Amino acid sequence: MTVFKGDMSTTRDAETNLAIWLRRIDPAGRLTASARDALGSSVGRVRPFQARETLFHEGDAPSDAVLVLEGIAARVKEQPSGGRAIVALLLPGELCNGGLQLFRHLEHSLRALTDGRAARIATATLQRLEAQHPELHAALLRAAAQDDALAREWIVNLEVRSAQGRVAHLLCELFVRLQALGLAAGAACAVPLLQQDIGDATGLSAVHVNRVLQALRRAGVVRLGRGALEILNFPRLADMAAFRPDYLELLEAV
Amino acid sequence: MTVFKGDMSTTRDAETNLAIWLRRIDPAGRLTASARDALGSSVGRVRPFQARETLFHEGDAPSDAVLVLEGIAARVKEQPSGGRAIVALLLPGELCNGGLQLFRHLEHSLRALTDGRAARIATATLQRLEAQHPELHAALLRAAAQDDALAREWIVNLEVRSAQGRVAHLLCELFVRLQALGLAAGAACAVPLLQQDIGDATGLSAVHVNRVLQALRRAGVVRLGRGALEILNFPRLADMAAFRPDYLELLEAV
DNA sequence: CGAGGACTTGAAAGCATTCAACTGAGGTGG
DNA sequence: CCACCTCAGTTGAATGCTTTCAAGTCCTCG
């Protein structure tokens, strides 16, 4: 198993890395081979990261984009009060631009919530790529539009739902997104988030997240623990969350 | 005053409409004359709207983009529970794309919160414009990046701040944005929002918004009423809101 | 085996919601 | 011109959800 691991994994991983990205931006497999190749060639150095590592930091100068290949990262805004507000979760295949050279300073940090791997992609490379391949431009635009829709749904989540609804909604969303990326096995998927992270993403205290998760478990709807998310009764969970996957629409087909 | 009003206002308004848009996407006046002309020619029929009017509706097929010229509109997500969640406020000069032809259905509505005027701009026209004028593409991209940053700040607002902090933050943001658009007169500006609207944008009940506004008024920090917002003590208001205008940076200079 | 981090539990306090009634301003029709 | 109607804003009391604090358990790793 371990023999030649270094050598063999180098090229195989390059393909795997691209495949993950493609599952996110081109789930229907519509891109031409040349566009796919160009995309693959833009994936630069892949670097592993550890949970709690800061991939880039709020206030820094704009940086390259970061493509998450494995694990979960979060767009985070640190608060003067000491807490961290999670503004978006980045799953494998998702791209976080580093300010696009548009802002003077980055207005949020990128923080790893779990161990994983990420690639840096220079903003200039991305721009060249989009200019040369209109279909890539369209694909990336679509992905960005989805991220926007996701952010808006988070706003709704925070504005109108109870603690239980918020957590249930986040779990629904995570499951559907991971499933679309091919990262779910039946009704289960790996979600190695801390209860504190869930709290930072839902505006709840970690203590209360704990109680809500217990209630959901006792209701036989969903289990989250030991790094795994198991959906026991999706319709009921979706109902408790008032979950309408419309806003994720593009993640599946098109 | 009223003589020839119709005729005279037609051309003058066309210039005014463009000026409002330019203040938003090109505050520094860097665009070339030809780009400005192209932009102006894309502004189609201008239509007045009334408070509470729905400009386009959630679930409909993707539509043209809407440019708000006067008044305040909101991206709204209607809730099964009957309420409305406000996901973004659109001030004069701000553009709301109609789904970009990317989503099958619009995932939110566009609703007028006050009386005003808006122009429809065909998505195809916008795309052609951006293709022909790279500088316009850049300007619109920048505006879109600001909208994203705004959405993320709203998420933070909902996640970490108290009721008072949320309302104070929204008022800070509104004032700074309106000021950047040249719509503030000293420390005052027109903000004809209902307390219910503030509540829908901050995830609070209208009743509680009322109490918070009273507290802010009693503290001598800010007054909101009769359609006007008066900032009495901005430093203190910003402090109560933990307001850091970094995320609005691009609205001012560049 | 010890240490640290994540998770769990209980009790008390606080903040925001809900319900319901009332005030006030603006506009309409008699 | 006034009566009336409506809608936004205001107020009070009661309820309840969520936080905070503090202690304790469980698990993993060194």
Image (tube, coloured by chain):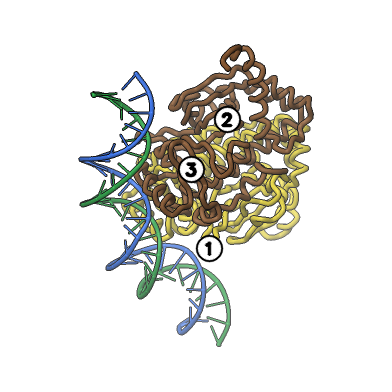
Chain colours: A brown, B yellow, C green, D blue
Query: Which kind of residue does numbered mark 3 sit on?
Result: Ile
Query: Which kind of residue does numbered mark 1 sit on?
Result: Gly
Q: Which residue is mark 3?
A: B155
Q: Which mark is residue B165?
A: none
* 3D distance between C-alphas at marks 1 and 3: 22 Å
Quarter of the image for residue A181 reads: top right
Query: Which kind of residue does numbered mark 2 sit on?
Result: Cys
Q: Image point 41% across, 35% down: which residue?
A: A84
User: Label 2 is found on which chain of the structure?
Assistant: A
Check disc 1 and report its element: helix, strand or loop.
Answer: loop
Can residue A158 be seen from the camera position used here?
A: no
* 3D distance between C-alphas at marks 2 and 3: 17 Å
Which is nearer the eye, B45 or B88? B88
User: Label 1 is found on which chain of the structure?
Assistant: B
Q: Which mark is residue B82?
A: 1
Which is nearer the eye, D3 or C18? C18
Q: Position of residue A240 (x, y in %)?
A: 49, 56
Q: Position of residue B58 (x, y in %)?
A: 64, 55
Residue A199 vertical position relative to residue C21 in the rendered view, above or below? above
Q: Is A34 placed left or right of B164 in the picture?
A: right
Q: Earlier in the sequence, mark 1 or mark 3?
A: 1
Check disc 3 and report its element: helix, strand or loop.
Answer: helix
Q: Position of residue B89 (x, y in %)?
A: 55, 49
Quarter of the image for residue B94 reads: top right
Q: Which mark is residue A96?
A: 2
Q: Residues within 10 Å of mark 2 (few under 14, many from 20)?
A: many
Residue A173 vertical position relative to residue B250 in the rendered view, above or below? below
Can residue A12 be seen from the camera position used here?
A: yes
* 3D distance between C-alphas at marks 1 and 2: 35 Å
Q: Image point 63% across, 25% down: which residue?
A: A17
User: Label 3 is found on which chain of the structure?
Assistant: B
Q: Position of residue C9 (x, y in %)?
A: 29, 48
